[in-house]
Image: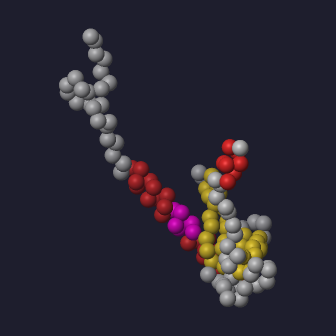
Amino acid sequence: MQSMAAQNDLPEVQLDLKALYREDVFTDRRAGSIRRLTPVTADGSVDPTRPVLFSGQTQLLTPAGVLPLGFEIEAATLEEALKKFPDGVRVALEQAIDEARELRREAASRIVVPEVGAAGPGPASGGKIKFP
């Protein structure tokens, strides 16, 4: 009986019927891919009241390994998205480089704080051998 109770406690996951998209992926199998999300209604027909969305994906080989890049493309057509793809890669790469620099700065500026009582004079300090 407990397994049924546990199943009833699970959240109900349901798709939002007013926010459905059909996904198409276009790729040259070399430089990357463009994903087109076309809004659709619950019966699968195109929903003209919402915009088509485009995003790009690519991977760059770096000395640290493969760097995946994903980015939105503001475009009305696939042809326009294809033309804007190179600029999207450039902007996404610049953002990734900036984020890496910021992480490096944060790591370099961290201050190591000793634990309370780990250092200092007196019998309360830890880490010292004490004999009875």
Q: Colour scheme of this structure image?
A: secondary structure
Instruction: Please provide the residue range marked out in magenta.
Output: 92-97
In which quadrant of the rendered image does the C terminus lie? top left
Residue 132 visible here: yes
Q: State yes or no: residue 61 in magenta.
A: no
Measured from the top left, where is residue 78 in percent x and y? 73, 82
100 relative to 73 in the view: left or right: left
Residue 60, located in which quarter of the rendered image? bottom right
Measured from the top left, where is residue 107 in percent x and y? 41, 50
Residue closest to the far top: 132
Number of labelled discs? 0
Q: Nearer the viewer, residue 63 or 6?
A: 6
Measured from the top left, where is residue 130 in percent x and y? 28, 16
Judge whether 114 appears above or below 125 on screen. Answer: below
Residue 81 visible here: no
Residue closest to the far bottom: 48
21 relative to 73 in the view: left or right: right
